[in-house]
Amino acid sequence: MGNDKKTPITINDKEYMVEDLTPEQQTMLNHINDLDRKLSSARFNLDQLAIGREAFINMLAKSVVSETEVEAEA
């Protein structure tokens, strides 16, 4: 008794078994999965960059306001 469990995937609302795909089709699927991971990582990095940029904008604005207040007091 071997492990006969197959991995289902859905393409255009039809179910296929990964193991029944041709090697070329499996390679395409691997590319799709890898690209999905890269897109997810890129979105994550973009979120970090946008939030980091916003934090620096806020820090700069606060710094400028603080400097202006110090100059006004002088």
Image (cartoon, helix red, strand yellow):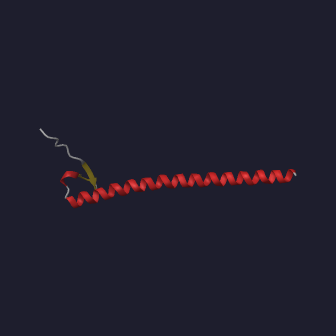
In the rendered image, the residue lying farthest to the top is: 1
The residue lying toward the viewer, choosing from 7 and 11, is 7
Number of numbered discs:
0
Q: Position of residue 43 (x, y in %)?
A: 47, 54
Whether residue 17 appears in this view of the structure is no
Residue 37: image location, x then y, percent: 38, 53
Q: Judge by depth and name the residue closer to the eye, 18 or 53.
A: 53
Asked whether residue 11 is in view, the answer is: yes
Q: Quadrant of the N terminus?
A: top left
Q: Tell me the residue at 64%/53% (across/down).
A: 56
Which residue is rendered at x = 35% and y = 55% of the image?
A: 34
Residue located farthest toward the left when viewing the structure as drawn: 1
Task: Place residue 31 in its image quadrant.
Answer: bottom left
Please report the residue visible at 26 percent of the width from the left and 51 percent of the height from the top. 9
Above or below, 5 against 30 in this view is: above
Residue found 73% across the figure and 52% down from its top? 63
